[in-house]
Image (tube, rainbow, N blue to C red):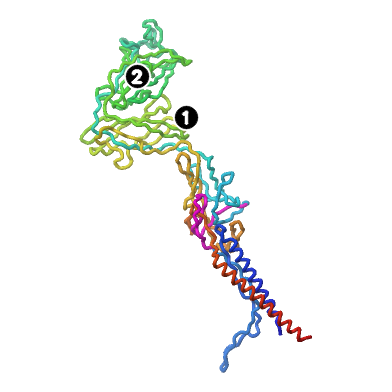
Amino acid sequence: MASTTALFTGLTGLNANARQLDVVGNNIANVNTTAYKSTRLMFSNMFSRTYHEGTPPGDTTGGTNPFQIGLGVGLAGTQRNMNAGTISATGDGRDLALDGAGFFVVDRNGGQHYTRAGAFRLNAENMLTNISGDRVLGYGVDEEFNVQGGELLPIAIPVGQLTIAQPTRLVRMAGNLDADGSLPTGGARLTLGGTAAAGLSAIAGATPPPGPGNVLEATTRLVDVEAPASPGSGTPLFAAGQTLELRNVLKGTRLIPTTSFDVTATTTVQQMLDFIAQSLGIDTTAGVNPDGNTPGVTLDPATGILSVVGNTGVANDITIDGADLRLLNADGSVAGYPFVPTKLSSADGESVRTTFVVYDTLGTPVELDVTLALTGRATTGTTWRYTVESGDNAGAALGVASGEITFDNEGRLDSGSPAPIVVDRSDSGAVTPLTFSLEFGGAEDSFTALTDTESAIAASFRDGAPIGTLSGYSVGADGAISGSFSNGLVRTLGQLPLATFANPEGLVDDGSNLFSVGADSGPPIIATPGQFGTGQIVAGALELSNVDIGEEFIKLILSSTGYSASSRVIRTADELMQQLLVLGR
């Protein structure tokens, strides 16, 4: 008798193989989908109709096996192949691939999703997003660009908008000082008089008056100094509200920055002397010069002549012309030239000068000059005195640091490095003072004192930078996002963590290359790349689909054959039923 059961059994075969074609078709359709994970459909037999459960063996008979006829095929479920696809280079550093089991974390409408498709780009708000506009989540940074782990936040990379500057903290010098250079005999010596033959004097009735035998004292007020052109007239040389300006003075071969000194009703001669010494950058802590003169600016009270004594070294020589010290009225007009300079001798001795630029906290360039002058030579080595000057130092003081460095008898640096440098940046808007270390050498034999034709030094390293704008970014294997600025600085802008799951096949496919947590996937473990099996990030590449097209074509053939065979079963059962109906006619 024909069996209707065979009809329904064949129907299950049709349904199962039709679903297999659906799965195979989906895999083939996604053969070029970034980071797609192929799926396979698993069949299982349906319950069977049992005619006899079988019997055990007896003493004289053998046992019988169960007598069962199956009722068709069922769908056990799908399994996702989570093996990594081939990593293909794209040449675009913004593309990211994963070499490991991890997933990128993205935010879609407030919910976390997970993806291995790393074709990320910046949107109009400079947020890192995927192709569907979902924001990529990661760790942010603090004000010092240190990664702040913990809370996942949307990653922002403000290219073209973020600006930074970095103050200088270290300058390193390199070069050689001529150990056989000439020893100094003295520094520059000049006089500043009221005329070519006479000094300055106080007017009658000056308060306080000069002591006996003195024509002028350091405590005399400037407004009580008599004009040399009108001796005995009581006409003052200076008036309150005027400004004494020092300009165009040569120190070695360079011009000293212009400085000015305000004259008030209480300003004294000593204050003017200090102003001149500071403006000329004379190091008054260097001690007595070999010729017995002490560096500085002093007054001879008996003659009223001002004496200027500079430091040793040709680079510290001072040249002042008559027009270099001028007196200005409150409206800026020139009131006169109060001093007549006379140069008595020039500075000598081996010396060298170099200039470099550092940066304060606002990125403002600050120019400094470093001069090294030979001060002594002995069997143990040579001694050099360094002076650091800056026209950008607030106030009239040109010098910002001085000290000695020594070299052994093999020309190697022995002591004195590094030197602390402090530059006053008052009223500049930047943090004041600007402090950094001046390191002579740093690497072995990079700063020496050996015999040569001349001394030569230069700044070989300097940190700090002026203002720079974020111009690009890159992602490292550890997920760190490094921003490149137009001033050459590189700073960490964030970090991309990765998620792993105990059972990644249990994730729910949400489309758009996104997965969400499933009932059997387990919770996500968020870690930095390289931890907990997350793998590493490969920049400039994308993960390809892991679909094996050859395998899918074989499944396609098998599914088609299975479908045809099941339809043949249905047709055969139908033919038997037709024959049975013929017998009944």
Quadrant in the rendering for residue 256:
top left
Q: Is residue 105 left or right of 1 when viewed as pictured?
A: left
The quarter in which the C terminus is drawn is bottom right
Pointer 1 residue:
428
Spatial CA span between label 2 and label 1: 30 Å
Q: Name the residue: 35% across, 10% down.
A: 201
Which x, y percent locates residue 208?
38, 12
The label shown at residue 320 is: 2
Q: Residue 77 in the image: x percent, y percent?
A: 61, 68
Residue count near mark 1 (Cα–Cα under 10 Å), binned few <14, some 14–19, many ≥20 = few
| Residue furthest to the bottom | 60
Image quadrant where one finds the N terminus: bottom right
Q: Classify residue 234 as left or right of residue 546.
A: left
Pointers 2 and 1 in contact (C-beta within 8 Å): no
Q: Amino acid at mark 2?
A: Ile
**Span colored in magenta:** 82-108
Q: Residues within 10 Å of mark 2 (few under 14, many from 20)?
A: many
Task: Pick whichever, 251 or 207, lies toward us.
Answer: 251
Between 428 and 464, the residue placed more toward the observer is 464
The quarter of the picture where residue 118 lies is bottom right
Tag 1 secondary structure: loop
Give the residue drawn at x 28%, y 34%: 177
